[in-house]
Structure formats: C-alpha cells, structure tokens
Image (spheres, rainbow, N blue to C red):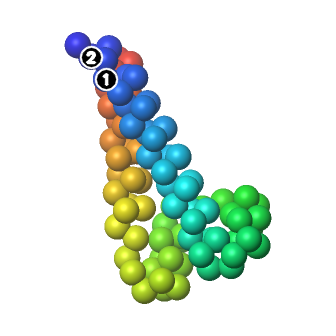
Amino acid sequence: MRIIFRPIGYLLAFTAGILQLIFWFIAWVNWLGILGFFIGLILTPGVLIFPIIYWIVEGDFPTVYFLLMFIGFFGMRLAKLGSK
C-alpha cells in the first residue's frame, strides 16, 4: 500500500511546482509587461519574499501561492513516506 504514496507524492509536488512557476510568470508579466517575462526568467522566486512583494504590489494576499506551496510540501512528505 505504501508503494503507491511515492508516485502520488511526486505528482503532487511536480504539479504544484509547475503551477507556482506559472503564477510567478503571470505576476511579473502583469507588473512589467513583456519585460517582466524576461525578468521572471532571470530571477528566482523567493519562497517567502515573493508573496510579500506580491501582497504589497497587488494589495491581495496570495493564498493560491501558499496553498500550492503546502501541497508541494505535502507531496514531498508523501513521497518520503512511500519510499520507506
């Protein structure tokens, strides 16, 4: 039964990571246009710095970003549980 946890955990973490990357690029493009896309390629998203900047600029708390982050953490824990 535990063997099924590993691929599910990896799938959750991978999907959450890709969605966070899309969130990152959309935020930069909304702020700076096409220049924001290139800045998004160069810079890396800080785990806690980016949401604070997003909150200040947009005036809206990034709950989706944190939800995706915790889904990724849960996926990695699930994968670790399945590998034992």
Q: Position of residue 48 (x, y in %)?
A: 49, 67
For badge 2, the amino acid type reads: Arg
Q: Position of residue 67 (x, y in %)?
A: 34, 57
Q: Position of residue 8 (x, y in %)?
A: 35, 27
For the residues labelled 1 and 2, the Cα–Cα distance comes to 5 Å
Query: Is 21 left or right of 73, judged from the image as shown?
Result: right
Q: Is residue 46 visible?
A: no
Q: Residue 60 is drawn in which quadrant?
A: bottom left
Query: Is 35 left or right of 22, judged from the image as shown?
Result: right
Q: Residues within 10 Å of mark 2 (few under 14, many from 20)?
A: few
Q: Which residue is mark 1?
A: 5
For badge 1, the amino acid type reads: Phe
In this rendered view, identify the residue nearer to me: 32 or 69: 32
What residue is at 37 percent from the left and 22 percent from the top?
A: 6
Q: Which mark is residue 19?
A: none
Question: Where is 44 relative to 2, above or below?
Answer: below
Q: Which residue is mark 2?
A: 2
What residue is at 48 percent from the left and 38 percent from the top?
A: 14
What residue is at 73 percent from the left and 58 percent from the top?
A: 41
